[in-house]
Image (cartoon, rainbow, N blue to C red):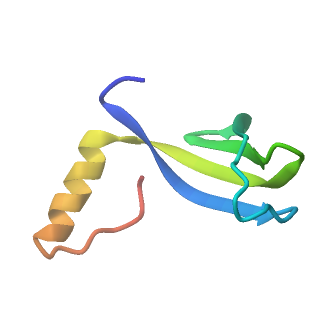
Amino acid sequence: MSVAFRAFGTTAVVVTAEPAALDAAVAAVTAEVAGVDGRTITFRVEARDPLEVIGGGTHQRVIVSVARFDERVQRKLRGRTVSSGGR
């Protein structure tokens, strides 16, 4: 990915499927791309202990222009209103 663009996490929804013992280690966490819609990438995520799946869900990230993001943050820091339109 170019340094001109960066992915930011926007949403994470994770549901516990099974309890894990207090001393149990998470054996594996996986993420796979479930879909791409424009600049938004949706991942399917899953966590397992040594015996079974203990949770899973989705995580979304959006690709943004670093320059435009920084410009919006700088305007906000200067106290100007930042419109969410025209992303």
Q: Residue furthest front?
A: 23
Q: Residue 2: where, in percent of width, then height?
A: 36, 23
Q: Residue 45: where, in percent of width, then height?
A: 73, 45
Residue 31 vs 56, above or below: the answer is: above
Q: Residue furthest top?
A: 2
Q: Residue furthest left?
A: 78
Q: Nearer the viewer, residue 73 or 84?
A: 73
Q: Residue 63: where, in percent of width, then height?
A: 47, 40
Q: Quadrant of residue 28?
A: top right
Q: Nearer the viewer, residue 83 or 79?
A: 79
Residue 3 vs 27, above or below: the answer is: above
Q: Residue at x 37, y 34 (%)?
A: 5
- Left or right of 2 in this view: 16: right
Residue 66 vs 22, above or below: the answer is: above
Q: Residue at x 79, y 61 (%)?
A: 20
Quarter occupied by the N terminus:
top left
Count of all numbered marks drawn on residues in the image: 0
Q: Residue at x 67, y 41 (%)?
A: 37
Q: Quadrant of residue 55?
A: bottom right
Q: Residue 46: where, in percent of width, then height?
A: 77, 46
- Left or right of 71 in this view: 43: right
Q: Residue at x 10, y 70 (%)?
A: 78
Residue 74 vs 32, above or below: the answer is: below
- Left or right of 53 in this view: 71: left
- Left or right of 5 in this view: 72: left
Q: Nearer the viewer, residue 53 or 72?
A: 53
Q: Nearer the viewer, residue 44 or 79?
A: 44
